[in-house]
Amino acid sequence: MSDQNKIIVRFPPSPTGLMHIGTMRTLLFNFLYAKQHEGNIVLRIEDTDRERSKQEYAEDLFENLKWLSISYDEPIFYQSKRTDIYKKYLHILIEKDLAYISKEATAEEGQRAEVIRFRNPNKSITFSDVIRGEITFDTTELGDFIIAKSANEPLYHFAVVVDDFEMGITHIIRAEDHISNTPRQILLQGAIGAPLPIYAHLPLVLAPDKSKLSKRKHGEFVSASFYRKEGYLPEALVNFLALLGWNPGTDQEIFSMKELIEQFSLEKVQKSGAIFNIEKLNWINKQYIKEMESSAFHEMVLKFLPGEITDDKDFQKNPNLLSLLEPILKDRIVKFSDLAEMAKQGELQYYFRAPILQKEKVCYKKSTLENTITNLEKLVSLIKSLDSFTQDALKEAVDTYSLEVGRGEVMHPMRYCLSGQDRSPDPFTIATIIGRGETISRLQVAINLLKE
Ligand code: GLU
């Protein structure tokens, strides 16, 4: 592709808060489009609002982009460092009488300040949007709008238009809430002699009740970093975000980044709002978790398990524990922060440490001490007699016996003695993870307790 035809898109976030998940979706679409066409991606931090812009929010953005493997070109531009460039263009417009300085009353009584207004030619603007088709606006009602508070303080519309021109942006792919800004920006492009870029206005990301996803209403769910902290996988979040407004037109739901770059198309982006459905994200995340390689899975488990578990000597003792737990955990969790909840509920500890039992909880419902002791002793002897201590062999032996005396009579005390919980995954799983010796030992502790 010759340089003349090179596609250049932009990431223009305003660092006034934690990165919004909807903005992340917009950046992803820009990224996919640019990568597909071997184009460039300009990252431009729009920090002209000096009071609200903070470097920490820019850092949050960089971290999220890195986490999601959404890359961009260097250098990174900061609008706050480009005042001289905007000033140059402001002067040109004033010189050509396309803009003028106006002394106006301010909010403070008796005070007047200078602002720079654009001399609106008051025409009808029509542009073609890749997603929405032709859009026409009458710009008369915009009047002579303000483009700078002073020569050193350009406003958003002006800075964006100058930057898009200076940076050679060919495609402006942004959310629908910017449609109404477009006619103003097209007028300014005409004034500074910039060519008309191609526009694609993406549907907004909405909550399930179709309200706008806002921090006030939806709290931390709107920030991209929340998903990182909750232990979603970056590949899963990218996959989910790609489907927020884009539909491949097939049944495929799981996409690698490579497939997204190949298959993405602006033409298949919908016009109507894209609903953010966390259930769908959970489902996608689960698919990715199931497919994880053991080493990567173990690394994430260790990162998300609370310190009280990872620092526990009993936990550290068995080097195979994570491998043994892997299928159970892959089955149970939707995101890695679920591990903390499991630990809090005591659903992990029994895999590496014998529970402390309460005598009155060992017997099933109204079963007697004698019956329970008999059943536990029978279990011990069954376990000792097995040739190999596998889950299937154990289950078969125990099932045969429990059919005779009643399932609950055997399964309840077995489950409780091994886990200290009324509910736990099936006791055969626990038994084979902790091993034959430990299983017998836990059952024996209960027998002794009941005989006290
Ligand atoms: N900085 C603007 C925002 O974060 C984006 C401007 C644009 O896409 O033109 O909303």
Image: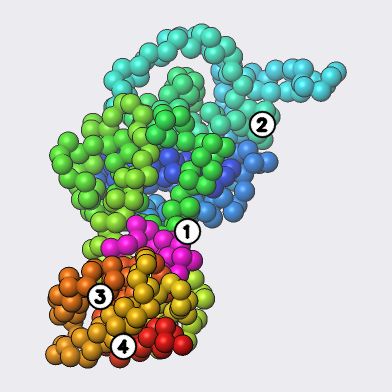
Q: Which residue is mark 3?
A: 428
Query: In this rendering, which labeled residue sits more in front, label 3 or label 1?
Result: 3
* Kind of residue indicated by mark 4: Ile
- Marks 3 and 1, the one that precedes in the sequence: 1
Query: In this rendering, which labeled residue sits more in front, label 1 or label 4?
Result: 4
Please give the range of residues in magenta: 330-347
Label 1, secondary structure: give it. Answer: helix
- Residue 327 appears in which quarter of the rendering? bottom left
Q: Which residue is mark 2?
A: 151
In the orientation shown, which residue stands out farthest toward the right?
Answer: 110
Residue at the image position 84 percent from the left and 19 percent from the top: 109
Mark 3 → mark 4, Cα distance in angstroms? 13 Å
Q: Which residue is mark 4?
A: 440
Label 4, secondary structure: give it. Answer: helix
- Marks 2 and 3, the one that precedes in the sequence: 2
Label 2, secondary structure: give it. Answer: loop
Mark 1 → mark 4, Cα distance in angstroms? 40 Å
* Kind of residue indicated by mark 1: Lys
- Marks 4 and 2, the one that precedes in the sequence: 2
- Marks 1 and 2, the one that precedes in the sequence: 2
Mark 4 → mark 2, Cα distance in angstroms? 82 Å
